[in-house]
Every structure is written in C-alpha cells, then in structure tokens.
Amino acid sequence: MSTINCQLIVYLQTLWQDISAKRVMGTATNLTYSTLLAFVPIMAVVFAIARGFGYSMYIEDWFRNSLSSQPDAANTIIGFVNSYLVHTKKGLFLGIGLVFMLWTVLMLISNIEMAFNDIWQVKRQRSLFRTVTDYVSLLFFLPIVIVISSGLSIAVTALNHQLGDMVVIGPLMSFFIEMSPYLLWSVAFIGLYVFMPNTKVELRSALWPGILAGVCMQFFQLIYINSQIWISNYNAVYGSFAIIPFFLLWLQASWIICLCGAELSYCRQNADDFLTTSFQNLSFQERVDISWDIMQLVIDNFRDGGRPYTDMEIKSKVGKPMRIVRELLYDMQRIEYLAEMTYDEKGSISRFLPSQDVNRLSKPHLQQQLAQLRPVE
C-alpha cells in the first residue's frame, strides 16, 4: 500500500510540475480575457442560427440554466446579445459587425486550440481552410446539440411526472434528471479534449479526464449557487458592478478545470513517458546526440527505400520519451534537416523524411544549427 501511495504522490508532483511548466494557470487567465471579449459575439452567432431555425427559446433556456449560478450575468448577456443582433442589421454596421463578430469567434477558438496544442506539445495548427471549415461547422453544430439536449431534458422531465408514482421507475427517472447536468458537462469536455488538439487523441484517454472535469464543473456550479449569502454581501458593496468580477471568476475557474482536464488527458495517453526526465533537464550535448540518432535512423531508412517513420515509430526505435522526440523533431524541421509529411489534418499519420541531400548532413553541422536555436547552457 505504501508503494502505491508513493507512486501516486510522485505522479501528482510530476503532474503539477508539468502544469506549472506549461503555464496552465496563465493560459487560463489569457483565455478568460479572450472569452470575455468574444462571449457576446459567440452567443450572438448561436442565437442567430437558432432563431433562423425557430429554436431561440430552447437556446435561451439552456443559456440561463448553464449560468444558473449567475442569473444577473445571464440576463445582462442576453440583453447584450439581443442589442448586438439588432444593430448588426442596420446600415454600415451590418458588414462591420458581421466581420468583427466572426473574427472574435474565430480568434477565441484559435486561442483555445493553441492552448490545447501547447499542452499536447503540438507545434502545428490547422490549415486556414480547415480552421474556417471546422470552426464554422462547430458553430452550426452547437445550436443543434443544445436544442436536442434541451428537447430530451423536457421529454424526460415530462415522462418523470407521468411515472413519478411508480415505485422503481419514478426514482430512477428522478436520479437521471439530477445526473443529467453532470452527463452533459462530461460529454462536452470529452468532445473538446478529442476534437480541439491538432493531433490524434484517443477516446479512452479523454474519457475519464472529461468525466472528472464535468463533475468538477458541476460541483463548482453548485458551490457557486450555495454561496449566495456571501455574494449578496458583495453586491451590497459593489452594486450592479459585482456582475463583472463574479463572471470573470466563473470564467477563470471554468478554464482552469478545462485545461487541467486536458493535461490529465495528455498524461493518460502518454503515461509511459510521463514520469521520465523532462526535455528541460537534458543537456545540450544530450539533445545533439539524440537528434543525431534520430537523423541516422531516418537517413538509413530513406536509403533502404523503407516507408518513412512516424513519431511513434521513431520513439520506439530510439527508446526516448515522446515529449523529447517531438521537441527534437520540431527543432530538426526548423533547421531544415527533416520534413514532415502529413496525410491528414489531425496529424495522426505524419511521417518524416530528410529535407535535403543526406550526403551533406553531418553531426557537427547539426550541432552548429541546433546551437543557434538553443544556445549551449
């Protein structure tokens, strides 16, 4: 038992070190600011799409339920959204407003993708075409999901009233209704962890972190709602201005929960490498030696006419952690020693080839080029 406890302590310490090294808390703060700037335009897009299909009532009810811990903020934001949509229909503001609305939405989602890519140590974002198509599809898909979930919630609630007197089914339906917020948050986080990083994320790696993040998010909502006495005292001092700091607090906590869940997903998928020496602890000469081992592996395979190796195949052959291999592969692409051939946009099938004449490549020249990227400590 003591051995398991020691391993758990070491794992948690390493997890915290990884969160600190990737500046997850700082990233959550940056995303809070970005979300505050883009929140009204995003909701305006969602409301506009829903109104086009005649489902605005469902979206508004869902939004109020999602911000049930902050009813004043929900009412204020809905007022802003309605005003925003009215003004975007008038004159010159029609074109400018639509461009600004789409720009803020795309920038926020792009910032979220960069935050997830940093956690997953992915250096390459989606192409411009896939950025537009994926993000616009997401915006159109979101209202449909909300309407379906709201419709199911209404149907289950109505069914619960009809079956409430039944001894077995009634309590089960009530339990399902109480658990539905946890389920919806968990599904949302799982989808975010699988879809957002520009790399292949296995569903099993995102499953438990998504459920944990969903449960934590709902618990945070409940704690927030049950602290109304403290909030009312705060309102007495700041008045209506208290909506802003409490909304920022809610956003900040939400992003911390989300990003920590993403970090857990990354650690779960790379569990074999997670407790190994980090890249930052390698000396410059060790980086050069490992880089040259990778280059020799790729060059020999290229001369033999073999199929180009993926990063996973290179990792298994050189016997180094994935975080180190990916960082060195990226460095060798920057100095034009390697070229990455990507066969799909998610980067799940990326293979590496020499990017220049292999007869001109040498370890001293590699060392010189890497020194320009990362000066010798």
Image (cartoon, grey):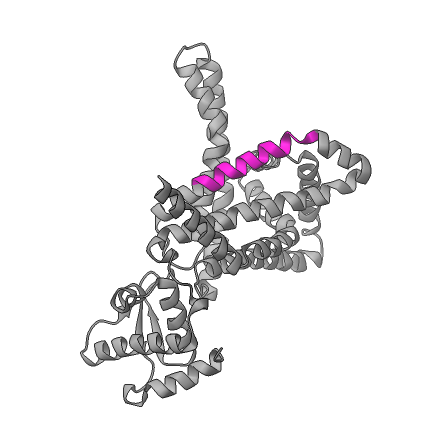
Q: Residue at x 46, y 14 (%)?
A: 162
Q: In the image, is 153 to the left or to the right of 28?
A: left
Q: In the image, is 217 to the left or to the right of 231?
A: left
Q: In the image, is 203 to the left or to the right of 211?
A: left
Residue 196 picture quarter? bottom left
- Regarding residue 155, the answer to whether it shows in the image is no
Q: Is residue 370 above or below residue 23?
A: below
Q: Nearer the viewer, residue 308 or 294?
A: 294
Q: Which residues are magenta?
A: 211-228
For the view shown, which residue lies furthest in the bottom direction? 360
Q: Nearer the viewer, residue 210 or 364?
A: 364
Residue 161: image location, x then y, percent = 49, 15
- Regarding residue 269, the answer to whether it shows in the image is yes
Residue 76: image location, x then y, percent = 71, 40
Tell me which secondary structure the magenta stretch mostly adopts.
helix
Instruction: Say if the magenta span includes residue 213.
Output: yes
State how many labels appear: 0
